[in-house]
Structure formats: C-alpha cells, structure tokens
Image: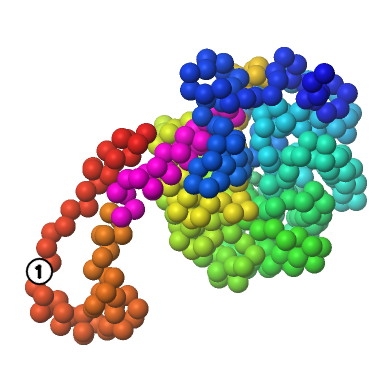
Amino acid sequence: MTRNLFIGEREFFPGIGKIRYEGRSSDNPLAFKFYDPDRVIGGKTMEQHLRFAVCYWHTFRGTGADPFGPGTQIFPWDEPADRMDAARARVDAAFEFFSKLGVPYYCFHDRDIAPEGDNVATSERNLRAMTELAAERQQATGVKLLWGTANLFSHPRYMNGAATNPDFNVVTHAAAQVKAALDATVALGGENYVFWGGREGYASLLNTDTRRELDHLGRFMAAARDYGRAIGFKGTFLIEPKPMEPSKHQYDFDAQTVVGFIRHYGLEGDFKVNVEANHATLAGHSFAHELQMCADAGLLGSIDANRGDPQNGWDTDQFPVDLYDTVSAMLVVLENGGLHSGGLNFDAKVRRESVDPEDIFIGHIGGMDAFARGLAIAHDLIEQSPLVANRASRYASFDNGDGAAFACGDLGLEALRDIAAANGEPASISGRQEWLENLVNQYI
Ligand code: XLS
Ligand code: NI
Ligand code: NI
C-alpha cells in the first residue's frame, strides 16, 4: 500500500503522483529534469540552497480573470458555496499540491486562506479557524511556512492607501489586519513576514503630503516589529519593492529606495528586502541588480521568483524559465552566502489560457528546473571560471599602497591631486565584458 498523497477527504489532483527527478533525457512533463532535491552542490543539497515556496494567492485564489473577462480556470477547490467550506477545501488542495510537487515551503496573505468577515472580530475568528487547519496540515505533511502577509490592497477601504492612508481610521484597520496576520504567522512557525505596499503610494501631489505618509509608514513598521517581537516572532520582516501598479507612485520603488527607508527609520536588524524579479523589470532594473543592491547592504532577505514580459510594462507574473536570469540571480545569491531565512517563492501564475490543473504543476516544475540549473551553473562559474578572480583583479590598485590608504579614508583631495600629478595619465584598461558574457554562455 502506498501512502495517500492527499490530505483531506478528497483528492484534488487525481492521476498526478509525487513529482520525481528523472533527469534531462526524460520526456515526462510531470518530472524534474534538473531539480534533484538531494543533489549536493558546494556542501548543501539543492533543496537547502533553493528553499522553494508555492504562493497561495496565484495558485489557489487565481482564476485567470483579467480586466476584460472573468476567470477561465474553474477548479474544484472553489466549488463549495459556503466561503469557509471553500477555504477548507483550498487548504486541502494546497497541501496535496505542495506534497506532490515536493516543495518545502508556502506563503499566503490573510485573505487568501480565510475570508474577510463583516467586522474586525469576525475576520480574526475566520483567520484563527483556518490557521488551526493549516497547522494540522503542516504537521501532517512537513510543509512549512516561508512567510505570511496581510492583504492591505484589495478591500475598497484601502483605495487611498493602508498604513499611508490620509485617514487614521483606515490605518487602524490595516493595523488590525497586520496584528492578526502576525498572530497567524507565529502560530504557523513562519520564518519571515512580508510587507508589500501596493497602495502605499499616491496618485497626485495635489492632495498628498508625502512626508507625513512616509513617516506614518515608518511608525507602522516599527509598531508591527514591536508587536511581532512581543509575541515571539523570531523571523525576519521583509519589505517587497515595486515601483507602480496598482498605485501610480509607490513609496517602495526599488531595492535601494527600500534600503534607504529601512535605514532612515532605524529598522535594520529586523527588516530586510524581498526582491521580486518582475518588480525589478518594472523599476527599469535587472533582477540581478536588485539582488546585488540588497546583498551589498546586507539586506537580501528573500526572493519572489517570477519573470515579466519584455514587451509588456506590467506585472505579468510568469514562471521563471529564462536561464540567463536564473544564473545571474544565483551568482548573487551564492556570493551572498545563500538565502539564509529567505527562499524562492513562486509569485507566478499560469497563463489565462492554461486551464488544466496539470498546467499548475508544469509551471512550477519549469521554474524549479530553471533555478536548479541556474544554481549549478552559477556554482561552476564561481568555482571553476576566472569570473571572481577577474572581478577582484580590476580593483587590485586599491589593495595596497595609496589606493588602500584612500579606501580607508587616509588620503584627502590634495594628496590625491599630488599623486595624479606625479603618476601622469592612467593606462587604458579593458573591462572585457564580451569575454565575460561568452564565459557565462560557455558554462550554460
Ligand atoms: C504584487 C506582489 C504581491 C506580494 C505579496 O505584485 O508581488 O503578490 O508578493 O503581497
Ligand atoms: Ni511578490
Ligand atoms: Ni508582483
């Protein structure tokens, strides 16, 4: 007898078993070609390096609806008419999916797993009930919570912002939600807690005092931190940058903006950054650039793994399959010493036209394979290629002598001027970018 791979009373993905590693030559679409969780790379298994998570919102609350038409993805977990019954069915479907796919983690918003009630107390009660069920399913499957968060953007009350709303009454509702979401995250052993501020921004300066709004956001984050620590949250708080959509101007524009915010409001030590690939694109940056800015600041927290569309300027949240992107990202992650308490959360959805439950598996399998390859290639580039040594050698003139004296602040402008005058015109040194690009392709 093989153990049931489903959890509740019903199997939601019949005909799909545990997804296994079959290697590159397999033609089974429901198998990993590269992600072999137990394969050791640089002293850690692929599973330990990559720390994959499935997101609840796209995968179990997405329907394929877009501004021009309703949902196309009619899945059985949405069938129950009662909202709490549907919520329970989704938990069972979700944990069946996590187990069959073999991901160690998941992530959710409060409203993904429990319906909002008519008032604060009912919403809290709904969330507590669903948290208890999720805790049982975590226990039964071994799947863990990478992070929890509160949805502070869907309800109409948040149209002018949540923590940055000009109306204090709205700010209190945002606080009530974050308090309950932190309670749930702690109860479920969540390793991080995320703030993505989709409506923390503004549309017009004519009606907005940006300085007060940002100060309120700083106060709000500090209050959340204090509450979280008071109830025993040991994990990392994360802010997820995004420049726009839904708001015109969002305060958490990009990684460097968020790093500045964290430092300005004294939140370092508790807060780091959750970098999403598609948000990097929207900010006019590459994914790797955003990761590098966080790593440099010691604030690389976690990753929302997806990709945008090179021709469309919105958050298409596609599954990451571009190898060049995953290699570039994993180069930064490996040089950062790994993701630590973060992970690779697939904030990604299948296309509206992909209507089979199997498509959801295939989307995740593709993303996991792309990052597994990215990891292996990046590891080889760091360990075997001249990449790292070449980069270091470009800065060799700062390693000793006057260069080192300048770097530690011992040389002023006049001394630097005298060195320039004495040494004359510098030699012209090639950056050799084409050689390095070819090297990356050679390892791919
Ligand atoms: C939306 C964001 C969102 C966060 C969680 O664009 O990516 O899904 O990750 O609130
Ligand atoms: Ni995201
Ligand atoms: Ni996004």
Q: Position of residue 355 (x, y in %)?
A: 64, 18
Where's the N terminus, which quadrant? Answer: top right
Residue at x 83%, y 28% (from the top left corner): 7
Question: Badge 1 is on which residue?
Answer: 425
**Colouring scheme, one of rainbow, by chain, secondary structure, one colour:** rainbow
Where does residue 401 sit, x and y in percent of width and height?
Answer: 24, 77
* Span of residues in magenta: 362-389
Residue 209, quarter of picture: bottom right
Q: Would residue 383 be counted in the magenta stretch?
A: yes
Mark 1 CB lies closer than 8 A to ligand 3: no
Q: Magenta includes 424? A: no
Query: Does residue 165 appear to the left or right of 230 in the view shown?
Result: left
The residue depicted at 27 percent of the width and 70 percent of the height is 398
Instruction: Give the prevailing secondary structure in the magenta stretch.
Output: helix
The answer to whether one can see residue 187 in this image is yes
Could one spot residue 173 in this view of the protein? no
The image shows residue 184 at horizontal and vertical percentages of 81, 50
Q: Residues within 10 Å of mark 1 (few under 14, many from 20)?
A: few
Horizontal side of 140 relative to 381 (left or right) equals right
Considering only vertical position in the picture, is 105 above or below 369? below
- Asked whether, in this view, residue 207 is left or right of residue 115, the answer is left
Corner quadrant of residue 75: top right
Q: Secondary structure at mark 1?
A: loop
